[in-house]
Amino acid sequence: MCTYLTENVDVEGSGKGTAGWFALSQATVYFDHPQHAQAEHTLNIDFLNPQDGPAARVAVELTAQSARALAAAIESALAAAPPGLI
Amino acid sequence: MYDAMMAETIRFTGHGGDLIEGYLARPLGPGPSGGVVVIHHMPGYDAETKEITRTFAVHGYLALCPNLYYREAPGASPDDAAAAVRAQGGVPDEQLVGDVGGAAACLRAMPASNGKVGVIGYCSGGRQSFLAAASLPLDAAVDCYGAFVVGTPPEGVPLKVGPIVHLASDLSCPLLGLFGDDDQHPSPEQVAELDKALTEAGKEHEFHSYAGAGHAFFAVNRPAYRPEAAMDGWAKIWDFYGRYLAG
């Protein structure tokens, strides 16, 4: 199905796309059809910088299970960072 | 039988007088031929949709697929363009109608045209096919599993879509609907509601829903592909367009 659901998040950081590194300003997160992954639905994240055009994009398509594992790993890594770094 | 055809990217005038890109496939015979506007799915103006467009030409139709994401992402790869447009909230309904109207006018102006133009859309394009048929003078419309013709998107969805079933009485042409029993967007209940609305409005329509098929069963490059449903769906399309667009 086309869920149409899209979470938009302002982000700061960098991503590496086909033309090299670029600054990120936005991420969209949605559970919908993938472009490439062989699953009917995946958790898709587009890291974007709209000011640099549509090709300024780093995309991932993850199964629901691996997306949850990634989210947990991100939280764990942040929680494990030495005090004062964050 | 002479069966040469040609497919190429063209520019034509879309909504608001904007020059936009489209993929045109046409038989090289003299015609007269019916026209088909192909509305791509939400993942974009991609290779598979261009193949669908060529398939209409193989079957004798002048077919034009507008790149609905051209304004926001000219020259971008289809997946990047789809992501950019999604981040901006999708294609506004008014713009869609203008672009399909421009594509239909472009097809009617071709020397080989018989003056008739139909529309077909997949996924989000299914809803847009219904919207176009309710907004423009067309000769036949096909809705392939379009979500949110009936039913409201969940709260907080930033995309510019809403239910349009109230436009049923405005439909300008017969509608063929192809759905999957296992789909939830649209669900079988929503398909039944649309069927009822069209019947009450006295609009000619023909709905088929396939057992064992869900959303996107025509999509040959996705796990959702269901050959049996897709092959029968194509046969239904040739029969329907044969009645309303050919000759």
Image: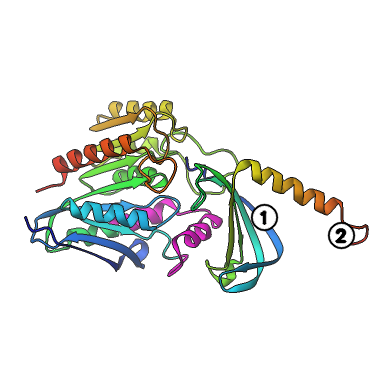
The residue under label 1 is which amino acid type? Val
Q: Nearer the viewer, mark 2 or mark 1?
A: 2
The residue under label 2 is which amino acid type? Ile
- Gap in Å between the C-alphas at discs 2 and 1? 19 Å
- Give, as a single range, the part of the protein colored magenta: B72-101
What's the magenta bit mostly, secondary-structure-wise? Answer: helix
Q: Residue at x 62, y 42 (%)?
A: A64
- Mark 2: which secondary structure? loop
Residue linked to disc 1? A9
Can the viewer see residue B174?
A: no
Quadrant housing residue B208: top left
Question: A4 or B219, which lies in front?
Answer: B219
- Mark 1: which secondary structure? strand
Q: Residue at x 64, y 72 (%)?
A: A22
Pointer 1 chain = A
Residue linked to disc 2? A86
